[in-house]
Image (cartoon, grey):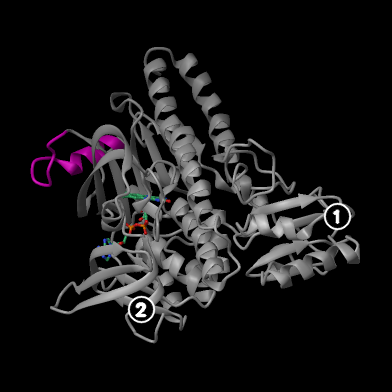
Amino acid sequence: MSGNDNEAPVIIVGGGPVGMGLAIELGQRGIRTIVVERYASPQPIPKGQNLTQRTMEHFHAWGAEAELRAAKTIPKDYGIGGMTAYGTLLSGHVHDWMQRELVRPYYFTDNERLPQYATEEVLRKRARALPALDLRFGWSAHRIEQDDDGVTVEIGERHGAGRKTLRGAFVVGCDGSHSLVREQAGITQTLSDHDRLMVLLVFKSTTLHELLKRYPGKSFYNVLHPDLEGYWRFFGRVDLGTTWFFHCPVPPGTTKDNFDFVRLLREAAGEEFDVALDHIGFWDLRIATADSYRAGRVFVAGDAAHSHPPYGGYGINTGFEDSRNLGWKLAATLQGFGGERLLDSYDAERRPVFQSTARDFIEKSIETDRDFVASYDPARDLAAFEAAWKARTSGARTEVHAFEPNYRGSPIVLGTTGAETNARGAHTFKAQPGHHLAPQMLSSGRNVFDELGAGFSLIAPDAADATVAAFVHAAEAMSIPLTIIRDTFAGERTAYEARLILVRPDHFVAWCADDAPADACAILSRATGRD
Ligand SMILES: Cc1cc2nc3c(=O)[nH]c(=O)nc-3n(C[C@H](O)[C@H](O)[C@H](O)COP(=O)(O)OP(=O)(O)OC[C@H]3O[C@@H](n4cnc5c(N)ncnc54)[C@H](O)[C@@H]3O)c2cc1C
């Protein structure tokens, strides 16, 4: 690339949460990146609020964890747990739901909750501090076209006549579910239609806060009503005590003007309460997955690659993981140590994870709830209902443990041949190829996560010097950034159950073993997509 302002190795279309996360990942690695975002400031719709522990690990890696926690709108001591209610919100038939704290020990950071626009503000601020990033807020992409040497992106000012032509080696569409980049790159989608029109309401109410004091520590509430056949009436706090959001299916043809939304809210709650509506929006409930996350020099990430109902809070979290996965691979390719197969592994790893998330978690939860409301009714048989309701509590716990996105079958992971990449696993401290690395305390008093490098890391506390030297020489010969961690673990034994662990830049395990490998070069080659 030349010194032209309108040229950069990477152009990101869409500066929502996923685009900004990717920009930071690249910017921190020194990759000059242009971000084109239509809006000058984030849109004031709360949307994706539930940020998992894993997402908070990204914010830690992106140098924005403290800022994000400071921007939260619900005080830490109030609680950000979830709850399911039967019939109405205040019916008294309730159980805990989505208790993400159950898997807290397997991650380096706590989970968090805040409105999406607040998260986006934090990302924008962090991105502004990175000199490698060129942020074009208030500009829209109108056309993209790729050729053998690069991609051309035509952009225009949203409120103005300015026009520019950008040129990049790669373009990433982080431009949401109606992605122009996906469409113009010719990437088709597979749709699973649920044929439901959904409403999103944002409203103010102080009496709802008073009514919900009977369920302390909860910030989101899922109401199962038999009429809705497994689809939810969903309340969420935007702040503590005043602002809320709500979504649920509404009859086809519903508009802002022909429906009594206040009555809907009161019916869903099961009591009268004061409501002042701030926002009414609609969308069609469906699951859409891009048939490929890559077309030549063009990639898609976040909602541009996968969109689905906001059931279980998988959207923004899945999108951030896309950014973390693609970011280091683009950087490694541009910096010369990523091989031919590295960029293809983005699709091979991330697409099956989303397909499994949609199938095994999102659609499964709708089916489970549909079966439940069809089978049990407290008015018909209270004892049978209560027994089944109690059993759901442990089911909800199992789901939190079982959601463990992994790349077991990835071409760049040295694991079991024929293994499947998906979102279904089990949280464990054991290091396993293709799985997220769990944190561990070292005898220095620091955590392994404090020591992991920005590139690859080899955890080798008690390996022979010659084994470590073989990795160091191989990495030097291939220009692969490699951090060596030789500290011993706190306590007698390591829960990793492996003496050598190669960790990728996104903190997934690429390879592990007890014994020195015959060829360290071969391991690093595979992990960087060279063979
Ligand atoms: C009611 C609701 C509740 C939700 N709750 C959760 C939750 O609890 N947890 C969770 O994980 N997810 C949740 N989600 C989903 C989450 O909001 C999305 O997954 C997330 O916004 C995806 O981020 P993104 O950056 O991929 O796309 P978007 O947020 O859609 O961002 C795309 C960006 O691209 C820009 N853009 C589009 N086209 C162009 C163009 N041509 N040129 C320039 N810019 C362009 C847009 O302006 C926008 O800023 C919820 C969604 C809704 C609707």
Image-quarter location of ligand 1:
bottom left
Dot label at residue 393: none
Left or right: residue 454 compared with residue 458:
left
The residue beneath circle 2 is: 7
Q: Give the mark nearest the N terminus, 1 or 2.
A: 2
Q: Residue at x 41, y 51 (%)?
A: 293
Of 197 and 334, which appears nearest the observer? 334
* Residues drawn in magenta: 252-268
Q: Is residue 286 above or below residue 150?
A: above
Q: Is residue 76 at all visible to an observer of this figure?
A: no
Give percent across and percent down for residue 398.
59, 34
Outermost residue toward the front? 148
Left or right: residue 139 compared with residue 497:
left
Near mark 1 (Cα within 10 A), the count class, few <14, some 14-19 or many ≥20, is some
Give percent across and percent down for residue 225.
33, 28
The residue beneath circle 1 is: 516
